[in-house]
Image: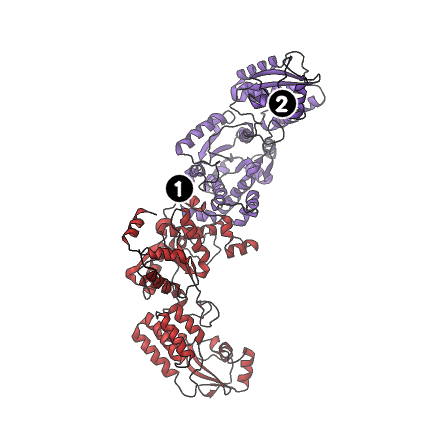
Chain colours: A purple, B red
Amino acid sequence: MPEKDISAARKASPLSREEVDAQMALIRRGIAEMVSEDELRGKIARGRPLRVKVGFDPTAPDLHLGHTVVLQKMRHFQQLGHEIIFLIGDFTGTIGDPSGRSDTRPHLTREQVLANAESYKEQVFKILDPEKTVVDFNSRWMNRMNAADVIRLASRYTVARLMGRDDFARRFQNNIPISVHEFLYPLAQGYDSVALKADVEMGGTDQTFNLLVGRHLQTQYGQEPQCVITLPLLEGLDGLKKMSKSLGNYIGIDEPPAQIFGKTMSVSDSLMWRYYELLSDRDMHEIESLRREVEHGRINPKEVKESLAFELAARYHGREAAEEARREFNSVFSRGGMPEDTPVLVCRRGEASAPVAFLSASGLAASRGEARRLVAQNALSVNEELCSDPLSPLPAGEYDIKLGKKRFLKLRVSD
Amino acid sequence: MPEKDISAARKASPLSREEVDAQMALIRRGIAEMVSEDELRGKIARGRPLRVKVGFDPTAPDLHLGHTVVLQKMRHFQQLGHEIIFLIGDFTGTIGDPSGRSDTRPHLTREQVLANAESYKEQVFKILDPEKTVVDFNSRWMNRMNAADVIRLASRYTVARLMGRDDFARRFQNNIPISVHEFLYPLAQGYDSVALKADVEMGGTDQTFNLLVGRHLQTQYGQEPQCVITLPLLEGLDGLKKMSKSLGNYIGIDEPPAQIFGKTMSVSDSLMWRYYELLSDRDMHEIESLRREVEHGRINPKEVKESLAFELAARYHGREAAEEARREFNSVFSRGGMPEDTPVLVCRRGEASAPVAFLSASGLAASRGEARRLVAQNALSVNEELCSDPLSPLPAGEYDIKLGKKRFLKLRVSD
């Protein structure tokens, strides 16, 4: 360890076991895995602020709640007095994918990287404290590396270890080409931890391998290895698949407050608790007691869900806009004739807003075929009017949907 | 192709089929393999001088005849008017082996590299024409490469192809670690061909894989691929194993003329023809006719061997010294009582010069055990005197050895 760190450690006052326990409780909340708990306790116990590194892609950010799981955890570390390094991996981004195989790694100019960094800040500072966040770029050290430095770096890791990464092993076995530079990217990412002397690195569970590379390389370069914390991939609105833009099951943090509110209201009760754990700022004890209240029927789950929807809308748009979103939601969905626990579906205008689509997507009909048959039998009413065309999309708006006498749906069609 | 080359090609006058045939005949002499014959014919036919690259290790050179096989082939290209690039791989040499696993890749300073280059020149210009030889260093371009350049280079080759290299495949399968930087060395060597726009690269058969990497990378960088010529690994004095310092079966080009002469005289007749093909400057037709003369008993093989020994001694020490070596050899080995075709064994003073060792090494005795028994039975005479101690080494000198009545050996013990 360099002298500077030792002296800092001397100046810091060690924490008591209870203080460490308190920090660990918040840090453990909602995480997938930690390597290792004992090491992290040791680092925390020294009492000096930890350097917590999280890497982000330099391509244009357009964050949804899935991305905010790690941001929430970064916020926890900030609340505990630690130093957060928001690291933009611009070095590889400005190279692009030299093999030209991947469209997901476009070549970015310096200007684009800086513009994207600004866009990141605008979005993430709704969660993170700007005062306690260092935004850094790995080009700062990677651009200074020459070929000999890369060879020295590469000498610190073995081919066999890299072949242990699931995707590499699978591709190698299936004769799907792996370019040699793909072996260098995890090493470059790991070297970032060396350059930053990171104490902790976090990422999604899909990043586990790369985070562990950093740990190994730090040891090779004579540093104390970073602790690795992985966070679960957030389930999308469907509660099944990972939240993603391409699957359409997401809540974007730049979406209008009414959308954030409405989409949150559309999740199942069990997913609601998951979102509470991973996204809410509320204390876990508080969340647990809410859950017990709901289980004992002393509180309506819709009310608890509204509270989460409000918190999320307020985080990204302020309390006033969130109040407005709640009022609007309730006025629309309190029209008569619909039971209290009517499910809510939010969809985009277009194919998804045609009766065959929303009836099958919501589960009111078992399939598109059944939806079509029931509409043909005049079983569908929209805002209490008969609807006999199964294929025409509904325009943007809010709708009370009834199918036969017993099946209800609140539908919001967005633009 | 860059404009410069095209214009050069335009200025050059194409060669006739016969002229190409003549060049190919000399180039093919003694080689192991060529990729590909048609491509090389095409390059030669354009009539402009080819750029022929051969890479050399930057560590202290101490060449033996095994190394001169490729030098002879470089000389052939020079005789045909082509441009020889004697490339010293100093870039990796100055890095050393960063993993610290290999003693064979010491870290060299700039000064050592330059001193070694001078030592190389002193030795190789006994074979190559200094006027037609470009000595270059790959640090010239490799030192200018940055990390991004290395990643771009690495993107041009796949892991699967590298795993096709015998030693990598074997180590991977046997769980012997391969450091990632070992994957970068063949790419760096291949990139040298790109930087030099090489038309031909040559090396030992153990270099085949690396030479083909250069071919592939040139295509990737939009160049015409180099032709690859591999040369056989020269058998040592034993006629069995590859000539090498550590096996002791070598003729060093810096050895005294008498040693070069004597060691050459000690090789078997069949190995003599191999050395003629790979090392002599004599025309192959001439060599073939000599071989026929010997086969028909019209010329004594000892005479032909002397002529080769003289050529090699003269190449490295001048004709006068070679004459002296021949005279000395003949005066020693013309002592009476030994048949004309007595085999010759050259060994170092020490263990190898003890009767059990040289009797078994020469094949006079079938084993060390038999040698020991025969000496105990007083069957051994050295310079016509009985020798009854099987284990005492003979001092440096020349000896007539008789074992029983019918087995003869001329032994030279060197210091």
Q: Which residue is mark 1?
A: A144
Where residue B290 sits in the image (x, y, percent)?
Answer: 38, 76
Whether residue A340 is situated above or below residue B60 in the rendered picture: above
- Are the residues flagged by discs 2 and 1 in contact, CB closer than 8 Å? no
Are both tags, 2 and 1, on one chain?
yes
Report whether B36 appears left or right of B47. right
Name the N-terminal-most of marks 2 and 1: 1
Residue density around tag 1, few if under 14, some if 14–19, many if 20 or more, within 10 Å = few
Name the outermost residue toward the top. A336
Where residue A33 sits in the image (x, y, percent)?
Answer: 60, 37
Whether residue A138 is situated above or below residue B1 in the rendered picture: above
Evaluate whether residue A333 shows in this view.
Answer: yes
Where residue A319 sits in the image (x, y, percent)?
Answer: 54, 17
- Going by the numbered disc 2, the residue's amino acid type is Val
Can you tell which quarter of the image residue B227 is in?
A: bottom left
- Going by the numbered disc 1, the residue's amino acid type is Arg
The chain that hosts pointer 1 is: A
Seen from the viewer's position, the closer of residues B41 and B64 is B41
Q: Which residue is mark 2?
A: A356
Name the outermost residue toward the right. A296
Marks 2/1: CA–CA distance: 58 Å
Name the outermost residue toward the front. B17
Report whether A412 appears left or right of B40. right
Whether residue A334 is situated above or below residue A71 in the rendered picture: above
State the SS at label 2: helix
Which residue sits at x=41%, y=88%?
B336
Whether residue A267 is situated above or below residue B1 in the rendered picture: above
Between disc 2 and disc 1, the foreground one is 2
State the SS at label 1: loop
Where residue A134 sits in the image (x, y, percent)?
Answer: 46, 32
The chain that hosts pointer 2 is: A
Q: Which mark is residue B383?
A: none
